Image (cartoon, rainbow, N blue to C red):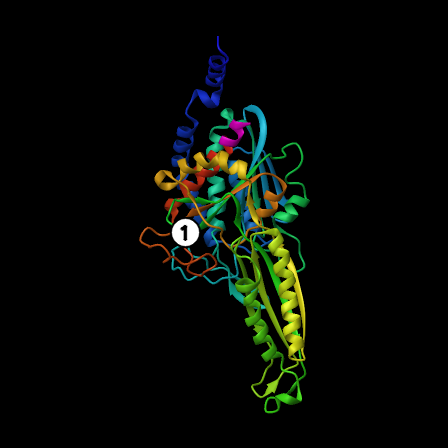
Amino acid sequence: MKFASVLALLLMAHPLFAADWHADIDAATEQAEESTVALRHYFHANPELGNREFKTAKKIAARLRELGFEDIEEGVAHTGVVAVLKGGLPGPTVALRADMDGLPVTEQTGLPFASKVTTQWQGQETGVMHACGHDAHMAILLGAAQVLASMREQIPGNVKFIFQPAEEGPPAGEEGGAQLMIKEGVLEGDYAPGAIFGLHVFPEASGVIVYKPEGFLAAADSISMTVRGVQTHGSMPWRGVDPIAASAQIINSLQTIVSRQVDISQAPAVVTIGSIEGGNRGNIIPDEVRMTGTIRTLDPAMRDEVHARVIRTAELVAESFGATAEVQIDKGYPVTMNDAELTAQMSQELDRVSRGGKAVVVKPIMGAEDFSFFANEIPGLFVGLGVAADNKAQGESAPNHSPLFYVNDAALPHGVRALSGLALAWLNAQ
């Protein structure tokens, strides 16, 4: 008998090949749809900020126990939940990840399950909202847990479910997020995953999967700057040094870094000043001005170059006014890098689960995600899922982090099928 024939017989004998596991995923996803939507509505109505997702974590753990999970770890990286589904056949471990935290945003959607939660944030009373879609991410991952648990005996290996707190960043003075989960060993031990998958919802056409090999989402770094001058009366600016005028020129000059000083044909970059504060009266030139901002890059070498140019530009422009600029740049999330080989291997699976039967390869997105820390440790693939309302044209939907951000429940099954299919496709390929 030829080797090819023997191999075919062996594959047919494998439980995953004996039946159409894609059909099994589709059928199980349909059965899980009602509970997935209900969970999404619960999480949406009960958001919690980073490192404070106490009720959220309890709900997740309780649902996993309902699904028959026994190996559940709670309190990971403060409030994270990690669970392992042990397949009925020997094999490696793959990880699926969702983030848990909401944002200090007062919701304006008018949905019947809209958040009415309020809290104190940086000394002010504010609403709390799942304005970035993490409610959908958790519900989708729990939907995938239901699907894969129903197929447990067919799975050649294990699936690790990672529910991660504080993706939007931990409170000041605290550790959190993906970095802390990694530090606490979530990618190590008896069920160390060989690959990790995740998704993020975006205001694109509902159910459409988007992705990009290699650099998909940008690195995000923060700027803190203090420009110091000499206080004087507003009617006599020559008697002092005006840090407001210096700051205005610094802001303008920073824009030339991207437009004139780096090769943006290689990769895009963004330098934004998002806040400026200085002075308290219209007739007093103050001593100092404080500014904060963000830097977004998609190339590691360009990241370092832009940092150096921001510091140099601010310091020299301030000096030209007789002022000084103290600049601090804190590195945040690195580029979310999709492993090229893994992405190519999974492209057919992404096509299968995307609405319309074709996933879309897109340009880089300048938003950032701390999934990037996981993907720096092991091969990772992070994709986008469109969740716009069916009656919204391209570009009409409110963006992530808006008080009007909307998730179309009809998109959730596409996400469940995506995570379930990616996990089984990877395990089956090992």
Amino acid type, mark 1: Val
Residue 384 sits above or below residue 69 on the image: below
Quarter of the figure that contains the C terminus: top right
Can you name the residue that lies furthest to the left here? 391
Residue 77 visible somewhere in the drawing = no
Residue 196, position in %: x, y?
A: 56, 39
Q: Main secondary structure of the magenta part?
A: helix
Q: Secondary structure at mark 1?
A: loop
Q: State left or right for residue 293 relative to residue 425.
A: right
Residue 397, position in %: x, y?
A: 38, 57
Within the magenta stretch, is there residue 428? yes
Q: State left or right for residue 44 relative to residue 70.
A: left
Q: Quadrant of residue 50?
A: bottom right
Residue 401, position in %: x, y?
A: 48, 58
Which one is nearer the viewer's eye here, 175 or 346? Answer: 346
Residue 27 sits above or below residue 6 on the image: below
Residue 306, position in %: x, y?
A: 61, 60
Q: State left or right for residue 376 relative to residue 393.
A: right
Magenta residues, as a range?
425-430
Residue 103 sits above or below residue 56 on the image: below
Within the magenta stretch, is there residue 126? no
Residue at 55 percent across and 57 percent down: it is: 263
Instruction: Report which residue position mark 1 lands on.
Output: 407
